[in-house]
């Protein structure tokens, strides 16, 4: 590894020196040479500068700086003071240079907040386009990023702003951010009125991403944000209301909580991801009429009071549908009623359904009742190509839904019935050599799910459909089944 590392350094340096030699012979103008150097990854640019005096001055003018624990060196014995000292030297060597992109990803450098304000004073100048500040989670979250940095010419040039694990309290005096396109706030202390005021001053905003901002209770998106097309909100635990008047919003993702949502005009909505109780029924009843142009829909529900109704309204353009259902407390829910979504989605190509339960309480196909499977009038779903069910079990209504798909989806090419949690297995590089733990009840039901597939589904699979049955690993779970 050391030899390979050395060869990489020598190769980079040799290339840079060769380029500079061409330049010194009159072959390349200095601005072109500088541009080529600026395209090097930061680590390679620094190495070239260390090995060649010719490139040292280019390094001091490098417009893109990404400074983090990995870039500075992953030596476990390196002290925090060394990392902070290196950052300080780099930024001060770039003092007076027009930095376009600055990423201070300071997680793992626990004393960085002590120097942050002085670093920002040196580096954040008019002309900067992207600014990322990431501090250590739960260590520096009260550190206030000074808003005075974003005044003067910075307001006119900044296009991308990401803040993580800090406090940010913008004031009305900041004025407009004419070119800000993307705003990402992760675990940031910011109040409702402060965020609303900041958004009102960001007329060009296109993407807004809020994650773990625990002080926000009411998110209001003003109508003046005509360019906003993507809104993502996740794990803002105190958030209760989202009210958007941005009429060109086309992608909305809400994760981690139940929130009252008012999206105003939604005819432009094409991608939607939401999660709260009773969402399946709500999506079928409300969204097909209020968001007729959806192309992708992802919904997560932990409770459903009623079965999904059959309606005349359609998702005419829906191509990708993902459902995550946890219905242990709703054993009366009829999986077969999800046929309503197929009936409403003539363009659907991919359907992912996750119904994994610790303890299956629905009526089993092996329950001793009628073995007659329900039928519906023939429908032709001519676009559906891929179906994957996770947590497949022996619930009779789930078997009936699967058989319905096989009978009516003539375009189906792949059907995957996964009786596990769907997580990485022991033969996956992601799993560390051990399958995801499963309870004894879940494993027993998974075995019944496989039996249901072999008994009621396998012989109905057309030759044009590739059926994949995913079973639990007998090596990792043998003890659970033998108890």
Image (cartoon, rainbow, N blue to C red):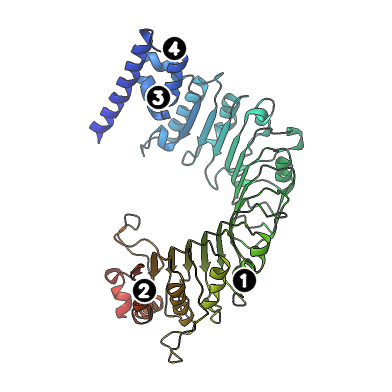
Q: Which mark is residue 281?
A: 1
Q: Name the residue under label 3.
A: 46
Q: In which quarter of the image is the N terminus?
A: top left
Q: Is mark 2 on a helix, strand or loop?
A: loop
Closer to the N terminus: mark 2 or mark 3?
3
Read off the residue under disc 2.
Answer: 461
Q: Quadrant of the C terminus?
A: bottom left
Between discs 3 and 1, the one toward the N terminus: 3
**Residue 274 position by quadrant:** bottom right
> Does residue 208 appear anywhere in the picture?
yes
- The answer to which of 476 and 462 lies nearer the viewer is 462
Task: Report crowding for label 2: few under 14, some 14 to 19, many 20 or more residues within 10 A (C-alpha).
Answer: some
Q: Which residue is drawn at 71% across and 49% down?
A: 247
Residue found 51% across the figure and 21% down from its top: 94
Say if mark 2 contacts mark 1, CB within 8 Å. Answer: no
Q: Can residue 328 be seen in this view?
A: no
> Marks 2 and 1, Cα distance to the nearest angstrom?
29 Å
């Amino acid at each position: 590894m050391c030899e390979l590392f050395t060869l990489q350094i020598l190769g980079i340096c040799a290339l840079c020196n060769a380029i500079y030699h061409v330049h010194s012979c009159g072959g390349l103008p200095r601005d072109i040479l500088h541009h080529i150097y600026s395209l090097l990854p930061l680590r390679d640019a620094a190495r070239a500068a260390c090995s060649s005096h010719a490139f040292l001055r280019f390094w001091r003018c490098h417009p893109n700086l990404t400074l983090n624990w990995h870039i500075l060196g992953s030596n476990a014995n390196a002290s925090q003071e060394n990392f902070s000292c290196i950052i300080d030297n780099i930024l001060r060597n770039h003092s007076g240079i027009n930095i376009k992109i600055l990423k201070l990803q300071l997680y793992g450098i626990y004393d960085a907040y002590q120097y942050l304000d002085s670093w920002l004073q040196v580096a954040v100048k008019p002309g900067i386009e992207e600014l990322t500040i990431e501090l250590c989670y739960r260590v520096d979250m009260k550190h206030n990023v000074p808003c005075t940095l974003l005044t003067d010419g910075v307001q006119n040039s900044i296009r991308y702003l990401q803040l993580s694990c800090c406090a940010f309290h913008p004031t009305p005096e900041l004025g407009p951010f004419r070119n800000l396109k993307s705003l990402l706030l992760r675990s940031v202390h910011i109040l409702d009125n402060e965020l609303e005021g900041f958004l009102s001053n960001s007329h060009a905003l296109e993407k807004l991403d809020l994650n773990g901002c625990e002080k926000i209770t009411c998110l209001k998106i003003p109508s003046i944000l005509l360019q906003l097309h993507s809104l993502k909100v996740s794990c803002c635990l105190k958030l209760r209301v989202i009210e958007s008047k941005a009429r060109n919003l086309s992608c909305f993702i809400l994760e981690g909580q139940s929130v009252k949502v008012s999206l105003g005009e939604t005819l432009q909505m094409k991608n939607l991801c939401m999660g709260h109780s009773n969402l399946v029924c709500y999506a079928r009843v409300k969204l097909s009429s209020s968001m007729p142009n959806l192309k992708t829909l992802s919904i997560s529900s932990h409770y459903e009071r009623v079965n999904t109704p059959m309606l005349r309204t359609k998702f005419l353009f829906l191509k990708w549908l993902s459902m995550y259902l946890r219905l242990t407390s709703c054993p009366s829910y009829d999986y077969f009623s999800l046929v309503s979504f197929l009936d409403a989605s003539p363009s659907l190509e991919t359907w992912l359904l996750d119904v994994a339960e610790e303890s299956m309480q629905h009526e089993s196909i092996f329950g001793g009742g009628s073995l007659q499977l329900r039928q519906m009038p023939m429908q032709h779903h001519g676009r559906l190509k891929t179906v994957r069910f996770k947590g497949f079990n022996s619930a009779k209504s789930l078997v009936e839904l699967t058989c319905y798909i096989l009978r009516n989806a003539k375009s189906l090419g792949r059907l995957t019935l996964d009786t596990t949690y769907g997580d990485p297995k022991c033969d996956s590089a992601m799993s560390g050599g051990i399958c995801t733990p499963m309870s004894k009840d879940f494993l027993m039901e998974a075995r019944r799910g496989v039996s249901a597939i072999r008994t009621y589904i396998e012989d109905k699979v057309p030759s044009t459909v590739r059926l994949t049955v995913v079973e639990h690993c007998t090596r990792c779970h043998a003890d659970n089944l033998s108890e």
